């Protein structure tokens, strides 16, 4: 534990249900967490520093990117950067007929291009610390449904980016990804506020009989961040309760 107390981790999208769990798990593991989000910091979020940032702007505007990365480096203050957790994402749904250019641009900027450019910008700090990148993907990279074209495409590309970076940067930093299915966040529960039966059906549809917890996802991220996970590189892990192993049989409906 003493070894990690001076080591830093960056978590994007830190104010969401998953992001908060990641911050808490890494803080409990002894890391100094630099949290980022495009909203005000959450109450009681146990981060060492908080940076308010719109990830899309860091992709589109080089001067904004330089400002943000300068602020992050000032918070590092020479301490090793153990990990960059690319967790932030937007989920813009739309039919083929209605999904517009702005929807696609924002989805790709936040979900795909920001993880690349943030990794690029912080590569020297990560390499100096023998650090790693963990990309939070989605089951939609492999299994999706209607109206998810932009989101699913961005997450599938994120998996490919993870493998590509692991190959190109092998020996310098590790790059891995996790693809969760349904996670029990306030946002998910809000979507089922008027449909408690639907939530029960969703739980039962997973072979494990439950949806994932943000805390369990946080534990998996921590395991990938720890130095003992050095052989995990270019890995895209399912975290889906076995749902991707299910054969959907219409005759049973």
Image: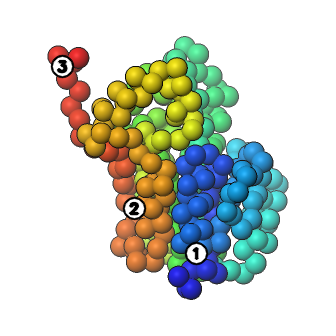
Q: Examine the rendered structure and indicate whether residue 192 appears above or below residue 74.
A: above
Q: Position of residue 126 (x, y in %)?
A: 59, 73
> Dot 3 corresponds to which residue?
252
Q: Residues within 10 Å of mark 1 (few under 14, many from 20)?
A: some
Q: Which residue is denoted by mark 2 in the rendering?
A: 234
Q: Residues within 10 Å of mark 3 (few under 14, many from 20)?
A: few
Snapshot quadrant of residue 10: bottom right
Quick one: 57 or 185, which is closer to the camera? 185
Looking at the rendering, in which quadrant would you find the C terminus?
Answer: top left
Which one is earlier in the sequence, the residue at label 2 or at label 3? Answer: 2
Marks 1 and 2, the one that precedes in the sequence: 1
The structure's colour scheme is: rainbow
Question: Distance of mark 1 from mark 3, alpha carbons?
Answer: 49 Å
Label 2, secondary structure: give it.
Answer: loop
From the viewer's perspective, is 191 left or right of 252? right
Relative image position of residue 152 (x, y in whole percent): 46, 35
Please give left or right for residue 11 compared with residue 217 in the image.
right
Q: Are marks 2 and 3 in contact (CB under 8 Å)?
A: no
Q: Which mark is first along the chain, 3 or 1?
A: 1
248 over 28 or under it: above or below? above
Residue at point 18% right, 19% down? 252
Residue pointed to by mark 1: 30
C-alpha distance separating marks 1 and 2: 25 Å
Instruction: Sort mark 2 into few (<14), some (14-19) or many (20+) by Cα contacts within 10 Å.
Output: many
Q: Nearer the viewer, mark 2 or mark 3?
A: 3
Q: Secondary structure at mark 3?
A: helix
Residue 233 drawn at (x, y percent): 39, 66
């Amino acid at each position: 534990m003493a070894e990690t107390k001076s080591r830093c981790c960056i978590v994007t999208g830190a104010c969401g249900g998953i992001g908060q769990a990641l911050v808490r798990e890494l803080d409990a593991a002894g890391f100094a967490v630099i949290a980022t989000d495009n909203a005000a910091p959450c109450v009681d979020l146990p981060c060492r520093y908080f940076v308010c940032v719109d990830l899309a702007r860091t992709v589109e505007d080089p001067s904004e990117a330089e400002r943000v990365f300068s602020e992050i480096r000032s918070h590092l203050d020479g301490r090793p950067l153990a990990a960059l957790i690319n967790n932030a994402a937007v989920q813009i749904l739309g039919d083929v007929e209605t999904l517009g250019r702005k929807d696609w641009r924002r989805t790709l900027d936040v979900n795909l291009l920001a993880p690349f450019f943030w990794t690029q910008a912080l590569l020297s700090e990560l390499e100096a610390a023998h650090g790693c990148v963990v990309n939070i993907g989605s089951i939609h990279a492999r299994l999706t449904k209607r109206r998810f074209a932009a989101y699913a495409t961005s997450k599938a590309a994120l998996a490919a980016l993870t493998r590509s970076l692991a190959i190109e940067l092998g020996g310098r930093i590790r790059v891995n990804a996790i693809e969760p299915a349904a996670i029990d966040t306030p946002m998910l529960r809000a979507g089922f506020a008027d449909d408690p039966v639907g939530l029960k059906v969703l739980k039962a549809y997973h072979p494990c009989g439950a949806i994932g917890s943000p805390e369990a996802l946080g534990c998996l991220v921590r395991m990938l961040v720890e130095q003992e996970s050095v052989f995990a590189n270019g890995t895209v892990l399912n975290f889906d309760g076995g749902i991707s192993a299910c054969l959907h049989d219409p005759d049973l409906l």
